[in-house]
Image (cartoon, rainbow, N blue to C red):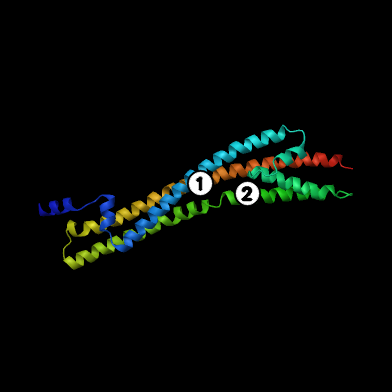
Amino acid sequence: MSLLIATQNMGFSPVDLFMDADLVVKSVIVGLALSSVWVWTIIISFTIKMLGINRKSEAFEREFWGSSDIAAFSKAHAQNELPVAKVFAAGMAEWRLSTKAKNIDRAGTRERLATAMDATIAAETDRLANRLNFLATTGSVAPFIGLFGTVWGIMRSFSAIAAEQNSSLAVVAPGIAEALFATAIGLFAAIPAVIAYNRFSHRLNQYEARMGRFADGFHGTLSRELELEV
């Protein structure tokens, strides 16, 4: 009966577990909680960002393919910061540089156009993926940080057994509860990070392929234009 009363008096809510934990376990929990907050911030902001980019890119491409004057279109979108617009701007910049000479190297121009746009696609993809590295790192590391808190809490439980010379639940339960709580926080941070990283990587691959298709189409347009140059 005394054992039942003792266990009932112990707090096992998340707040109680945190407040009763020692400094090491508290540090682990706080670090993982902050990581989890940042993970969800990245998830929400990246989702909103990609939705906007895809919607605006679709409008940009629709307007481009419906335009009859590439020079006027380029001037109208000179300040456009969309990734696909930067691919277009890179192609136009190389086109102007390569066609201003009297004798145009057609094969060289085509190669330089492809290189300029491919480099811009790679740079824009890297820029979009910048913060996703944190998701990958959190998904890989958070469970092990939580495991460290688990090991520390179990060690604390064994220390309590040695100090009290008593292996009752009232002695070992607090340390074990803290240990399991640290593990849970680690998984809470890691699982959404892994899911989001995989999902966002797929979306980035799709958008990179979209920029590649636009670049190929634009390259074909400029190649046909190149044939008309004397």
Are the residues at dot 1 and dot 2 in contact (C-beta closer than 8 Å)? no
Q: CA distance from mark 1 to mark 2?
A: 19 Å
Residue at (63, 35) in percent of width and height: 58
Residue farthest to the top, as pictured: 66
**First in sequence: mark 1 vs mark 2:** 2
Where's residue 117, x and y in %? Answer: 71, 48
Residue type, label 2: Glu
Q: Quadrant of the rendered structure where residue 92 is?
A: top right
Question: Is 72 above or below relative to 162?
Answer: above
Residue at (52, 52) in percent of width and height: 131
Residue type, label 1: Asn
Left or right for 66, reference 97: left
Left or right for 15, reference 48: left
- Number of on-image labels: 2
- Where disc 2 sits, the SS reads helix
Residue farthest to the left, as pictured: 1
Q: Is residue 14 visible?
A: yes
Where's residue 202, x and y in %? Answer: 55, 44
Q: Quadrant of the rendered structure where residue 50 is?
A: top right
Residue on which disc 2 sits: 124
Pick the front one: 149 or 82: 82
Where's residue 139, x and y in %? Answer: 45, 52
Pick the front one: 127 or 133: 127
| Quadrant of the image containing the C terminus | top right
Q: Residues within 10 Å of mark 2 (few under 14, many from 20)?
A: some
Residue on which disc 1 sits: 198
